[in-house]
C-alpha cells in the first residue's frame, strides 16, 4: 500500500554568485525584482539582495507564495488586505505593493487559505507573539 506524506518545505537553498543561502520560507514576506537582482523582504523588517531571476526563484517556492505582479511574489500568509481604491496589496507591517491586474483575477490567483494554512498561521503567531497575521471577520 502506498501512503502519501505531505512534505513541508521549511528552507530553500539559493545559489547567488559566490554563496549558497538557506532561507526559511516562513520568515519571507515577499520577493521584489529590481533589474538584475531580487530583494528578499523578511518578517523582521530586514532584507537581502540575491542574484536570481524571479521566474527561477518562483519554481523553488511552496504554493503559498503567489506572483501578484511581474516583479513581486508574496507570501500569502502575510497578506493583510487589498485596497481596491488605491490598487495596492498591504502586507503585514503595512508594506504597500501596487497591482494592475483586475481585482477578480488577483483574488483568484491568491486563492483561499486552507485549514492547514490557517493552523500554520496560528502557530507562527504564537511563536512570534506578534499581532495577528490575518484577521477573518
Image (tube, rainbow, N blue to C red):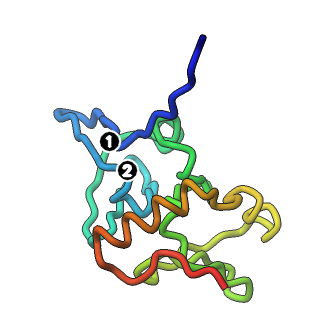
In screen coordinates, is 84 left or right of 119? right
Q: Quadrant of residue 39?
A: bottom left
Q: Quadrant of residue 103?
A: bottom right
Which residue is pictured at 37% across the width and 58% down the height?
A: 28
Residues tagged 1 and 2 counted as in contact (Cβ below 8 A)? yes
Alpha carbons under labels 1 and 2: distance apart: 6 Å
Camera-side residue of 33 and 73: 73
The crowding category of the residue bearing disc 2, from other C-alpha atoms within 10 Å (few below 14, some 14 to 19, many at least 20), is some
Q: How many marks?
A: 2
Q: Helix or strand or loop: what does disc 1 sit on?
A: strand
Please give left or right for residue 69 compared with residue 34 in the image.
right
**Residue identifier under label 2:** 25
Q: Quadrant of the N terminus?
A: top right
* Residue 5: image location, x then y, percent: 51, 29
Query: What residue sits 56% from the left and 25% below the top?
Result: 4
Marks 1 and 2, the one that precedes in the sequence: 1
Residue for point 28% across, 33% down:
15
Looking at the rendered structure, which numbered label has been put on residue 48?
Answer: none
Q: Is residue 47 above or below residue 85?
A: above
Neighbourhood count class around disc 1 (C-alpha, 10 Å): few under 14, some 14–19, many 20 upward: some
Where is residue 73 drawn, in percent x and y? 53, 55
Q: Position of residue 53 (x, y in %)?
A: 45, 40
In the image, farthest residue toward the bottom: 85
Per the rendering, the mark at residue 11 is 1
In depth, the one of 31 and 134 nearer the eye is 134
Q: Most extreme residue toward the front, as rendered?
A: 1
Where disc 2 sits, the SS reads helix
In the image, 117 versus 102, the foreground residue is 117
Amino acid at each position: 500500500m502506498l501512503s502519501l506524506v505531505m512534505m513541508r518545505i521549511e528552507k530553500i537553498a539559493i545559489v547567488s554568485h559566490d554563496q549558497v543561502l538557506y532561507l526559511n520560507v516562513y520568515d519571507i514576506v515577499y520577493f521584489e525584482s529590481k533589474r538584475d537582482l531580487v530583494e528578499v523582504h523578511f518578517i523582521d523588517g530586514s532584507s537581502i539582495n540575491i542574484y536570481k531571476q524571479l521566474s527561477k526563484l518562483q519554481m523553488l517556492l511552496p504554493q503559498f507564495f503567489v506572483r501578484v505582479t511581474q516583479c513581486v511574489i508574496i507570501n500569502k500568509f502575510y497578506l493583510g488586505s487589498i485596497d481596491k481604491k488605491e490598487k495596492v496589496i498591504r502586507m503585514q507591517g503595512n508594506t504597500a505593493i501596487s497591482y494592475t491586474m483586475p481585482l477578480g483575477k488577483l483574488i483568484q490567483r491568491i486563492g483561499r487559505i486552507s485549514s492547514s494554512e490557517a493552523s500554520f498561521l496560528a502557530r507562527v503567531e504564537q511563536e512570534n507573539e506578534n499581532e495577528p497575521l490575518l484577521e477573518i471577520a
